Amino acid sequence: MAEQCVFCAIVAGTSPATFVRRWDDAVAIVPLGPVTGGHVLVIPTVHVVDALQDLAVTGVTFARAAEIAPHPCNLITNAGRVATQSVFHLHVHVVPRAEDDGLALPWYSGRRSGGGRRG
């Protein structure tokens, strides 16, 4: 367990969380401030700082997220403080979506523009 990592403490059972699912290699929990109904975090049981540190752990974590993800949804992770990562333990946000749910991601507001890439 990484010292003072809240997600390591949750995995170890020393910090509270609402668990949605548990696997040997990951857990799914309800975040403190869900942005939609059904929003969960999928967290590997080993400490990995972000998605770029250990690609095997990242792959397994995303596979676990895909197992429980509804359609449509966003599967989101951030790598680094500048990319808005605030907890430095890999985690994947599974964010269920609905038509006109009003949740705008920073790179797409729902408005169509005359060009440029979307993705």
Image: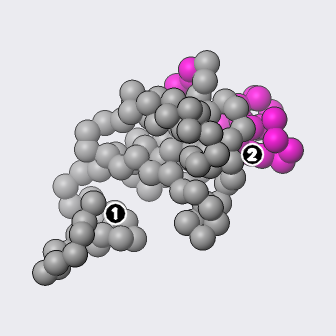
Say above or below: 85 vs 2. below
Of all residues, the one furthest to the left in this rendering is 114
Q: How many residues crowd around disc 1 within 10 Å: few (fewer than 14), some, or many (20 or more)?
A: some
Q: Would residue 18 be visible to someone looking at this image?
A: no
Q: Which mark is residue 6?
A: 2
Q: Residue at horizontal 24%, vertical 69%?
A: 117
Q: Would residue 88 be visible to someone looking at this image?
A: yes
Q: Residue at horizontal 81%, vertical 35%?
A: 1
Q: Earlier in the sequence, mark 1 or mark 2?
A: 2
Circle 1 residue: 103
Quadrant, the C terminus: bottom left
Q: Is residue 44 left or right of residue 94?
A: right
Kindly identify the amino acid type of the residue bearing the numbered disc 1.
Leu
Give how far across and how far down residue 70 sits, in percent. 31, 36
Give the residues drawn in magenta, as a range.
1-23
Q: Is residue 49 left or right of residue 106?
A: right
Q: Nearer the viewer, residue 111 or 19?
A: 111
Give how far across and how far down residue 5 sits, in percent. 77, 46
Kindly identify the amino acid type of the residue bearing the numbered disc 2.
Val
Q: Is residue 55 left or right of residue 109?
A: right
Give how far across and how far down residue 19 sits, in percent. 58, 30
Say above or below: 105 vs 72. below
